[in-house]
Structures are given as C-alpha cells and as structure tokens.
Amino acid sequence: MSLIERFADLVVRVGVNVQPGQGVVIKSDTAHLEIARAVTEAAYRVGAGWVETDWDDGPMRRAAVDHQTLERLTASRPWALERIGWWREQGVASIRLLGDADPHLLDGADPAKAAAHPLGEMQAMRRALFDGMRWTAVGAPNPGWARQIFGEPDLDRLWEAVGTAMRLDSDDPVAAWRERSATLSERARRLDELELTEIRYEGEGTDLTVGLLPGTRWTGGGMVDAAGVPYMPNIPTEEVFTSPDNRRADGVIRLTKPLVLAGQLVTGLRVTFAGGRVTEVTADSGADVVRAQLDSDPGARSLGEVSLVDRESRIARAGIVFHNTLFDENAGCHVAWGQSFPFAVEGGPALTEQQRADLGLNMSGVHTDVVIGGDGITVTGRGPKGVVEIIRQDEWVL
C-alpha cells in the first residue's frame, strides 16, 4: 500500500470511521485532487453510500476577495444552509483536507476581506459537527506547503514528515493511533478527577490564567458519537483539551510557532487578555489580519479552547515548523480564541445555544489555535486539592 493509500485508509477508518451506507463529504482544495481521489476510493471500499467533494480553489478565492464587497463575502446562502442541515440530519461523515497550496496567495489583500467567510454557514457547520456528524481534519501534502517549510517544493520530504507525524510509518497505523488515543484519554480522565477551577500557563513571554467552568470535562484522543461509533476529529492529535469560562482569562501570551491565518503568515504574535477578552495584539508581521478576525464577531475575542501538549508529541519531536495549524498546534500547549466545544461540560450538547452562552461557553464563527508551548512551558491547575503541576518544563508530570 502506498503512502497516500495508507493516509486515505487512516482518514476513513480512524478519522471518521465510515460505516456501511453512510454519506461522506470531503472538503478539499483543488491542489489536493490526488489525495481526495484516494480518500474517496477508501471510503467506498469500506461501504460508503455516497461521497461528495466540496471544492475550494485558491486563485478563485483571491478573485472573490479582490472584487467582492465585505458584505457579500460574509453573507450566507439559503441553499448552503439547507444543505448543511440535511447533512446534519443524515449523520454524514465530514472530512476536511488542509494545506495551503500557495501560502502567499492573499498577500496584499484587504485583511478584513481576506479573513471573511459566510458567518451563518460557518456557524451552521459547527453546530452540525458538534451535534451529530462525525468529522476529521487532516493535513494534505502539496508542493506549496513543502516550499513554505523547506524553501523548495520537495513533496517527497514533506510526505516523509507528515508520515512520521501521522504514524504512517508504523506497521499498523490504525492500531498505533488506537494506542495513542488510549494514552490521551487516560490523561483526560486524570484531569477530570481533579475538578480544576483554573489553569495557568507560564513560559518565556507567556503568563496566562484561564478560568474553567463547573463540570468541565477534558477530551483527549478520539471521541464517540451518539450511536457509540468512535472517531478522531484531528489526525494527528497529541493534545488534551477543553473549553474554558469565556469570562475569565487574564494575562499575556507569546506565540512559539508562526500562525497561518486567512492565507497570511503571522509571526511574533503577542496577545493580551483582560476579563476574558483580547485587549491588545502586536506582531512582527500579520497583526492586521489577526485584528480583523478578532473584530469579525462578538465572540472572536474570547477563548473557546485551552489545550495541553508535552514534548512527547510526534510533531514536537519532528523538530520542524509545519506552518500548518493542525500540525503545529500539536507540537506544544495552545489556546484558541473563538468557538467553544459544547461537549466540554457535562450535559453541554443537550443545552440550547443560549444556555451554553449563559453558562460561559463561547460562541463565535471562528476558532483559531495559537501555540504557546514548547521548551520551558509550565502548566499548573488550581482546584479543591490546591495547586497541581500538570506540565513542568514541557514534560507531562501529572
């Protein structure tokens, strides 16, 4: 089996765990055509009822940003909302292939327009993913992504790095991920037992304290849908995460990995929080596109996720910057502003959106992960047992 075939098999069997007769939607850039074809083949091989591909294309996106108004770029289309609702009702499996084919595609574009997407459609898709659909997001190697990492379009070298991060080099990648998932799930269980009320990240340029909600539940490794079918939302994943109280975040963070946002590279990002909200943003490059996203809706300036990753991560051990949030967020501890996860609190999925908001779960059309971990990071938690060390100098000690 080729590396692409092993990739596709893992995405279908572990990522979304396609069941006989189930529909599958693949969201992909046209640059990932060969990989999308392999994933389609793998889905049909395990019995998918149908497979639909929802295509993106970078140059077409740039044309829209250059020529459309901000209002049109953010307007939702009734037929698209109806289609997402039908996917949700049918329990369709959603696969997202990620990887910028041209990282500089939106250089020079209006930052607000570059960050714009149909807000209603994004919110509807997030509701569908959180309330019934099994989903996964994976990085899809392409020459443009390789050039950003290595300075040349060395696709073979990128596939080797991605294969290592995704455990495609294992004798049985499916079994390898089930083992890793069990380790992360056990970490989540230990954290649940502590009943933490807040966590604190400390490192060079970072000192952030974030409050947690009563009944907070941590998630690590895979998840299980309402029918009892296991799946893995992200491959690779090396994190244990939850959603915080969006009213309680104070301090400052300094990113330890670059961020690619709306097709633009953000470096040297520093963000200040007070009373649960982002109050200041500075960066060596790309600050404008970050500010534009933070201004895109009322919830974008509050946190929707806190995450714990240690140095044993496959991505951390790879020793390279992937310039892809899905990979780089799993190289170290990270937080995310924007949408929270309803399953982060006991009974959360059964609550209405208003009840979730009243509880302190953040609501937003965006969800942007930023890495603050790595060498020197220490994370402590506070709860009924006092202060507990979780990560010391980038090593899991709990």
Image (cartoon, helix red, strand yellow):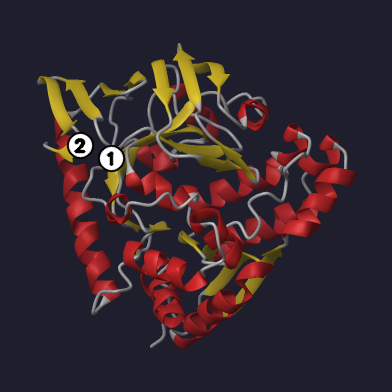
Query: What kind of element bears circle 2?
Result: helix
Dividing the picture into quarters, in which one does residue 296 lie? top right
**What type is the residue that disc 1 sits on?**
Trp
First along the sequence among labels 2 and 1: 2
Residue at (17% x, 39% y) in the render:
395
Dividing the picture into quarters, in which one does residue 280 lie? top right
Left or right: 101 in relation to 133: right
Q: Which residue is mark 1?
A: 218
Left or right: 338 in relation to 209: right
Residue 192 circle label: 2
Residue at (38% x, 42% y) in the render:
343
Q: Position of residue 345 (x, y in %)?
A: 34, 35
Contact (Cβ within 8 Å) of mark 2 with mark 1? yes
Q: Position of residue 86 (x, y in %)?
A: 64, 61
Q: Position of residue 82 (x, y in %)?
A: 72, 56
Query: What kind of element bears circle 1?
Result: loop
Q: Report if residue 270 is visible in the image.
A: yes
**What type is the residue that disc 2 sits on?**
Asp
* Relative to 253, residue 370 above or below: below
How many labels sit on residues? 2
Q: Nearer the viewer, residue 26 or 98?
A: 98
The C terminus lies in quadrant: top left
Residue at (30% x, 49% y) in the render:
316
